[in-house]
Image (cartoon, grey):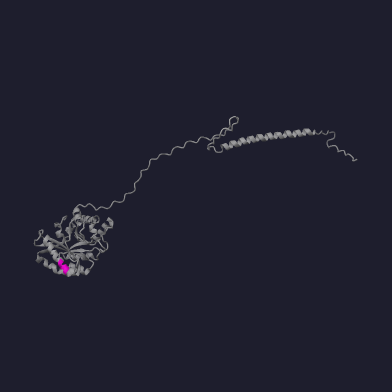
Amino acid sequence: MPRRVTPPPPLGRPGQKTPKRAPARRRKGARISLTRAQLAGIVGLTAIVALLGAYVLGNRHPHKPTVATAPPPSGTGKTSPRLPSAPPVPPVPPPEQHAEAPVTPPPAPPPKTEPPKVEPGKGGAAWRRNAVPSPQMAAPAPGAAHARIVLVIDDLGVDRPRSTRAVALPGPVTTAWLPYAHDLADQTRAAKAAGHELIVHVPMEPVGKADPGPGALTVNLSDEEVQRRLEADLASFDGYVGINNHMGSRFTANEGKLSIVLAELSRRGLMFLDSRTTPDTKGPELAARYRLPLVSRDVFLDDDQSPKAVQAMLAKVEEVARRHGTAVAIGHPHDVTLTALEHWLPTLAAKGFTLVPLTAVIAATPGGT
């Protein structure tokens, strides 16, 4: 049989009693009581945290409207915790009513340039100052002796030899000079010294494909450009009494464009010789509107440049002069024409005709002043 070993007594001060150990059942109850207290504390803390969390969540978006929830079923006796409500949102004021700004209409297109209103004689009678003296004679009557003939030579200045030959004709002859020719100051001065009147032979647009030359007045130009080109033509030389049209069957039939030309002539106190390259010319009616001195052509001498045709046209000039008292003939510096004139002009006085400058017949025309 094993021997029982007795444990040694606990260490301590001498004479100190050793405490007795509590019974095992008492120690177990103490542990159970401590655990329930801890659980109660934890539950209470959890409830507090939950309430704090709900409060924080309810105040996180103070301006967010709360969503209404359905009330709990009746009879439960339970109510949901009331969360803080969001502050009321102030009403948004209506937008300020501004008076509508006045609508600015789009700019109107520039008005079409109208020919200036010209007072007759405002620019002075320049044609009188530059006129060549002519014989003093009574106004002719049909069939009377000394009927007057006006001879105009167009297209001068470009062909210098033929222009010089035209200036050498016995005068007075009315000489029409193209504004784009060279040395016009010298050429026209020589013509004036020879006793001839001067006019500007202004190039204008014809019907068809014929070329009137540089700087011509055409119907598709703006009114301002027509005015500008006309002023350039009138500045090509001086001492003239007016203008006539070079070609121009289309331009002179256009009332709007021709009115710009005749208004400017009236303002300057000049006259217009209508070459009548078209029966639709607006020259006479516009000249009457502006009270502009105007003379119209009666006979073209050399549309047909054969010698026989030119002689026939010279005979027609004499016939018109006898019938109406005045005839206005236009020729060109062609050799056949110049040769015929060199022989014909010296015979006029013996036949009872008087050769006169263009300005001598203005008083007998409508609108002449």
Q: Is residue 121 visible?
A: no
Residue 206 appears in which quarter of the rendering? bottom left
Residue 70 vs residue 131: left or right? right
Residue sitting at x 13%, y 68%: 344
Relative depth, front residue between 189 and 289 = 289
The vertical placement of 124 against 15, above or below, is below
Residue sitting at x 64%, y 35%: 47
Residue 314 vs residue 94: left or right? left
Residue sitting at x 60%, y 37%: 53
Asked if residue 91 is among those painted magenta in the image, a careful observer would answer no
The vertical placement of 51 against 327, above or below, is above
Residue 22 placement (x, y as % from top left): 80, 33
Residue 248 placement (x, y as % from top left): 23, 60
Which image quarter is the N terminus in? Answer: top right
> From this viewpoint, which residue is outermost toward the right?
1
- Stretch of the chain drawn in magenta: 308-312
